[in-house]
Amino acid sequence: MAELEGKVVLVTGAARGIGKECALLAAREGAKVVVNDLGGSVGGGDEGAAGPAQEVVNEIKAAGGEAVANSDSVAEKNGAENMIAQALDTFGGLHSIISPAGILRDGMFHKMPDEDWDAVINVHLNGSYNITRAAINHFRDQEDGSFVLFTSTSGLIGNIGQANYAAAKLGIMGLSRIIAMEGVRKNVRSNIIAPFAWTRMIATIPVKDEASAQRVERMKNAMRADQVAQTAVALASERAKDVTGQIFAVRGNEVILFSQPRPVRSMARMEGWTPTTLIDHAFPAMKADMYDAGASASVFPYDPI
């Protein structure tokens, strides 16, 4: 039997890239799909066009599936509420939300305009809050529900020029973790994926040197959105009910389980610490266990599989 047979799935940002592949795969796996997309630009232009989402709906229907389009914004609380209501009104239920909707407004932090910070936080972090908050009580009441949210190695590890994006994506990690903890007794799950895939957002990243050009080419040719969709849909399946509160990355044909912050080294001083003794003793002793300031590419320097 298909993994999502009889289920209803909402996919945000589903007109293109990872979202589109998640919507198409969810439908192939038997789900009825609410295909949400604002129809906006990568930078968050608020077009509000239904066309891109409807094109994906048409593709699903042409393949024999069931789907409906939605052009609300995850950044608006009432938009998220409308998506949930549409799923319930149209298909009579909702069992999973896959939410890769997002924008990019990259720039060095010391030059970042307030509006670029606000826009990225609003779509990614507030958007994740809006969509989970709108659905959480429905999931708890039916004692069945799965959130698949999207983080990034920009937050988990770091990338220069993405302070707004990194802050939002690391915030999503905390949000998902608490939803998972609070949802255990009600069979409400939440996991996050850090995707490596060629998308419209990735295409906007400036290529300033040969190393970045090579990295972009690797992403374009070997890391596809449909590979990310496999893990997202698997996490939405009822058969993954024992997987919650986790952080995954998908990089080509690799699926990576990430560690989560835990103590790595401690130092104690019976008489207490002072700034001087911390600098002279504690910090040097911990130095070998400290992380450097390398970006995501320094942790994944090898070609994708």
Image (spheres, rainbow, N blue to C red):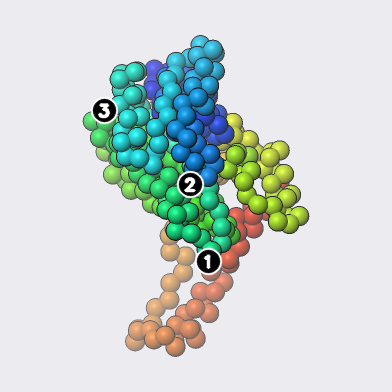
Q: Are marks 3 and 1 in contact (CB under 8 Å)?
A: no
- Between tags 3 and 2, which lies in front? 2
Q: Residues within 10 Å of mark 1 (few under 14, many from 20)?
A: few
- Between tags 3 and 1, which lies in front? 1
Q: How many marks?
A: 3
Residue type at mark 1?
A: His
Q: Which residue is mark 1?
A: 110
Secondary element at tag 3: helix
Secondary element at tag 1: helix
Q: Which residue is mark 2?
A: 151
Q: Which residue is mark 3?
A: 142
**Which residue ends up furthest to the left in the rendered image?**
141
| Residue placed most toward the observer, 265 or 261 | 261
| Left or right of 234 in this view: 147 | left
Picture quadrant of residue 81: top left
| Left or right of 130 in this view: 137 | left
For image coordinates 53% across by 39% down, the residue present is: 41
Q: Is residue 144 above or below residue 174?
A: above
Residue 93 in the image, given as x and y percentages of width and height? 32, 22
Residue type at mark 3?
A: Gln
Residue type at mark 2?
A: Thr
| Left or right of 215 in this view: 81 | left
- Between tags 2 and 1, which lies in front? 1
Q: Residues within 10 Å of mark 3 (few under 14, many from 20)?
A: some
Q: Is residue 60 above or below residue 289?
A: above
Q: Whole-Å distance between the Cαs marked 3 and 1?
A: 47 Å
